[in-house]
Image: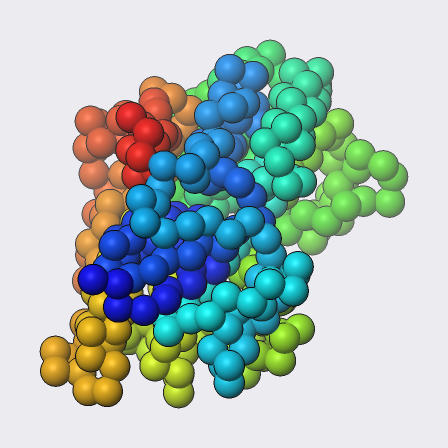
Amino acid sequence: MHHGDVVVIGGGYAGVRLARRLDGAARVTLVDRKEMFFHRIASLRAGVRPEWTATPFIPYDRLLRNGRLAVGKAVRVDTAERQVVLGTGERLPYDVVVIATGADYPEPARFTGSTTEEASKAFGEHQRSISLADHVLVVGGGPSGVELSAEIRLARPDARVTLAHSGPALLHSTIGARAGNKARTWLEDHNVEVRLDAFMSPGNEFGSYRDAHGNVMTADLSFWATGTTPNTLWLRLAGHGDWLNPDGHVRVDRTLRVAGHPDVFAVGDVNDATELKITPAALAQADLAAWNIRAYLNNPGKHRKGPRLYRPIHRTPFIVPFGPAAGVTVLPVPGGETAVLGGRTTTLAKAKTLMTPYMRRQLGYS
């Protein structure tokens, strides 16, 4: 029944999905430095609304029936001995290892500290500063910046809220202009000042910010929603810098393996398989990698069944909520153009619950 040891490093969206898929087909060990899953999609609202503080934390204790959780930090993948080395010195033998360490997001979407208490305290501090601010500046007009500006506006109807974006249009070029226009219209209708082509940096005075044209703005609170950093420094420090591309993402082939290592996979935000880092892509990669891992474990010498290949153009709807009652759904279509759907039902389902019931079910909680 159990055809080998699979060590999954990182318990984010991709790691959890993959560990669950393989639980029973292999001896799975999920390594994470936290004792609970951090539902990051709910974290922007948790940073703004006190009643959401505890929502992003879902314990791992019901995820695996057969496998186990090892709480700790992976510091090395020893490919010669086929072992994952933890910070404690513990060594976990593997037949297959999966790198699923994700990416780090800026505040308030980040998990601060190592316990629920520490992270909740950080969310509480953000909530307090937002509740007291006269002017909040959000820098970065990608999905996170748009969503955060909307949450802040709805929580603080009386405050001044500015969204400054370095590009010519909101949202991401890969998402398409129509969605960016919808976001801008909603924000401006709700009295958020949207500044485009405004590359911001901290000014000379505390609480002051300047754009590339030299305009200075003051704000008592700022959030920088300007992209993510893949969590791969540990791989570089362990001597696996050759596995990474110049951005620090793990380079994978179409089977989601690290080149030259049939037993090393990388899934989710940590790899270079997709330009647009969205949860549905991470889940699709986890499913595909689980299939390829099962085939490899059952038949390590020869692939009688050829491995499945990942195609980044998954027609995955991508939803940007504007608070709990509005948002935009985008469907990337082959050829690079995107369709913006009214899709009120899907949009509102995500905007309202931020996929929390879905993720609780994934972790064995109803």
Q: Is residue 151 left or right of residue 5?
A: right
The answer to whether residue 82 is above or below residue 179 is below
Residue 137 in picture, x, y percent from top left: 65, 33
Residue 161 in picture, x, y percent from top left: 60, 26
**Residue placed furthest toward the top:** 158
Q: Is residue 127 left or right of residue 175?
A: right
Write the residue at 60% across / 12% down.
158
Q: Quadrant of residue 95?
A: bottom left
Q: Is residue 248 visible?
A: no
The quadrant of the picture occupied by the N terminus is bottom left
**Residue placed furthest toward the front:** 1
Write the residue at 62% across / 80% down.
239
Closest to the observer: 171 or 271? Answer: 271
Residue 93 in picture, x, y percent from top left: 46, 70
Residue 79 in picture, x, y percent from top left: 49, 81
Q: Is residue 239 visible?
A: yes
Closest to the observer: 53 or 325? Answer: 53
Write the residue at 24% across / 60% down.
25
Write the residue at 72% across / 49% down.
201
The quadrant of the picture occupied by the C terminus is top left
Closest to the observer: 122 or 78? Answer: 78
